[in-house]
Image (cartoon, helix red, strand yellow):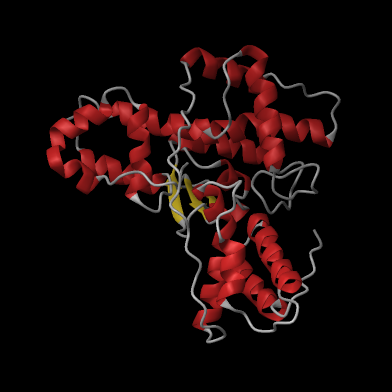
Amino acid sequence: MSKEYISFLTQNAKEFIKFQTASGRWNDIYDRNLRSFDRHCATMYSDVFVLTQEMVDSWCTQRSEENGTSCGKRVQCVRLFIRYLQCRGKTDVNEPEIPQPESSTYIAHAFTELELSNFFLACDSLPSTPRTRTILTRKIIVPTFFRLLYSSGIRTIEARRLGMDDVDLCNGVLNIRESKGDDQHYVALHETTTELLRQYNAAIRKLYPDRVFFFPSSKQNGKELSPKWVNENFNMLWYKYNTQHAIPYELRHNYAVENINKWNGKGFDFLRNFLALSKSMGHSTLQSTKYYYHLVPAMSDILLRLTGKDFDRIVPEVDYEES
């Protein structure tokens, strides 16, 4: 698809993109969907030069091949665009409705200690020869990158987009700017993870003394790592010694479950621990954090018994943010 805008919305779209980019809220998915909407307006309404409700609704209506969740992801950018135009008095059309998300049937893989031990053994066994920049970069980054996911519970996209200014190696704090939700948040690291990042930083800066991203890509001239890099390296190293299916994002699930398991037998200072976990994981609502209780054996029953009818008031039903 061409990256040029061709409809009467071109100037507004460019201004919107500039605004979103300056706010750190622009990505490839938004770009692709806004251009798709632009072409829809240009081809289906070639003789109309003002935005109408019909244009918006005809593109945003849920398609036969979509479920509620995928439709919502497609429509979200156009919804933000309409809101942007409304705030500036440039349109009076209504924002598109986002369909009710589908309930997820996905069940995350439950890692065993042996599987994790095998995986990190494979990470630590990467070759250092031939001593090319690509080989050395991979050997330095891989063990640290995946241990950071495992020990902090941050999303893969958050780790990939960490800038040098986002990592406080003195105090062990990550500043998560590029997150799934709209809120910036901070993640405090365990002291062993902080020390690992210090050692990593000392090694990688010899190859990238002026790098912008904390984890630079050798194939992209120091830019952020790609999702493909994460998946390919995880798969190759995971299946070196393990057989059960797993994906990188499940290290985040494991972090949540392991934390919840530690609460058992400690008096259930439930709300404090629950809020801390939710904030650390960057959830925009407490609903998203509740999902992980379903992954811990008997935890939902225990909490329901302790909190009674207040359980769903304190921890509402899970939504689709983490689906």
Residue 81 image position (x, y, % from top left): 58, 71
Q: Is residue 40 above or below residue 288?
A: below
Q: Position of residue 145 (x, y in %)?
A: 61, 35
* Residue toward you, 304 or 53: 53
User: Residue at point 74% right, 76% down?
Assistant: 7
Looking at the image, the residue that sits furthest to the bottom is 89
In the rendered view of the protein, which quadrant contains the N terminus? Answer: bottom right
Q: Position of residue 125 (x, y in %)?
A: 69, 18
The answer, for residue 271, to whether it is visible in the render is: yes
Left of 63 or right of it: where is 170?
Answer: left
- Residue 103 horizontal side relative to residue 36, left or right: left
Residue at the image position 53 percent from the left and 19 percent from the top: 116
Quarter of the figure with residue 134: top right
Q: How many numbered marks have been drawn onto this rendered protein structure?
A: 0
Q: Is residue 24 among what the camera can see? A: no
Left/right placement of residue 100 relative to residue 268 reads: right
From this view, report whether residue 86 is shown above or below residue 158.
below
Residue at 63% in and 60% down:
30
- Residue 161 x, y percent position in the rendering: 62, 50
When asked about the image quadrant of residue 61, the answer is: bottom right
As displayed, is residue 2 above or below residue 228? below
Residue depicted at x 72% and y 70%: 44
Q: Is 231 placed above or below 125 here?
A: below
Which residue is at the front of the view, 13 or 97? 97
